[in-house]
């Protein structure tokens, strides 16, 4: 019962429980047990942040980046993501990587994007692992290194990341930085297809027609 849960969290929050304060923020943000209200969500997240709740840092950053309940402000979003990232929050590290990659709220800085993607990738985030693989494959913000690209695509692929499986398959198909092996490429394209990536399905069918 979401309404009952909200009431319990609200009671705990009024008694200063930091986690409950954060949960009230998520309830208002998601409209869970209460009517959705981004301004209220921001107020509760700010309270939770004053108690050093790192998840609240991330959600405040998100609300600023999307302009929800507050005027959109990418610089403020960046500051909150950085606070969380420096406390080893993986989502915030990834978000910082995106902002540096695309120059959102700050000047584009690809080596800095690599740094934050690297931290999120080491922590196990597949999206960051894929982006890191892409940067190494194309030499963006880092010296081109196909072996590193293959490594990160493979790690992300083991988590079912369809784009990583597809890109790894493409490297095997072309023999780029690795011995060409169309049988392995076909298997990787198939796994990419299994994870709902249409180009993986198409490439798998093409290799099937070629007799692989």
Image: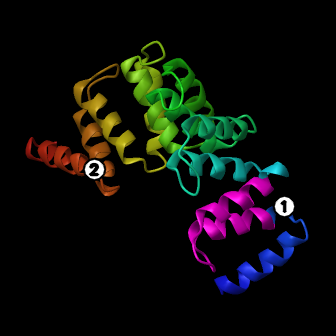
Q: Residue furthest left?
A: 209
In the picture of the structure, the residue carrying the numbered disc 1 is 18
The spot of residue 188 in percent (x, y) is 32, 43
Residue name at image x 91 percent, y 71 percent? 15
Residue name at image x 60 percent, y 40 percent? 77
Residue placed most toward the observer, 44 or 178: 44
Which range is magenta? 20-48
Q: Is residue 76 magenta?
A: no
Residue name at image x 39 percent, y 40 percent? 164
For this view, does 77 lie left or right of residue 167?
right
Q: Residue furthest front?
A: 71
**Earlier along the polypeptide chain: callout 1 or callout 2?**
1
Q: Residue furthest right?
A: 15
The spot of residue 182 in percent (x, y) is 22, 35
Query: Distance of mark 1 from mark 2, alpha carbons?
Result: 46 Å
For this view, does 13 lie left or right of residue 116?
right
Residue placed most toward the observer, 63 or 129: 63
Compared to residue 111, the image places residue 194 above or below, namely: below
Label 1: state its secondary structure: helix
Q: For residue 33, which quarter of the picture?
A: bottom right
Q: For residue 88, which quarter of the picture?
A: top right
């Amino acid at each position: 019962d979401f309404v009952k849960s909200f009431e319990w969290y609200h009671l705990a929050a009024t008694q200063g429980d930091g986690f409950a304060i954060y949960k009230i923020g998520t309830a208002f943000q998601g409209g869970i047990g209460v009517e959705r209200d981004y301004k209220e969500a921001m107020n509760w997240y700010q309270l939770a942040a004053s108690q050093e709740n790192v998840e609240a840092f991330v959600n405040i950053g998100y609300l600023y980046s999307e302009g929800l309940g507050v005027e959109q402000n990418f610089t403020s979003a960046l500051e909150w993501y950085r606070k969380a990232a420096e406390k080893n929050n993986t989502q915030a590290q990834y978000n910082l990587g995106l902002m540096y990659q695309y120059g959102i709220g700050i000047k584009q800085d690809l080596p800095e994007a690599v740094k934050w993607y690297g931290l999120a990738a080491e922590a196990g985030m597949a999206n960051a692992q894929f982006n890191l693989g892409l940067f190494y494959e194309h030499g963006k913000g880092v010296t081109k290194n196909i072996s590193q690209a293959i490594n990160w695509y493979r790690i992300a692929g083991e988590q079912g990341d369809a784009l990583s499986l597809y890109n790894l398959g493409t490297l095997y198909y072309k023999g780029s930085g690795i011995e060409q092996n169309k049988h392995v490429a076909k298997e990787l394209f198939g796994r990419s297809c299994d994870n709902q990536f249409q180009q993986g399905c198409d490439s798998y069918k093409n290799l099937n027609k070629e007799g692989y």
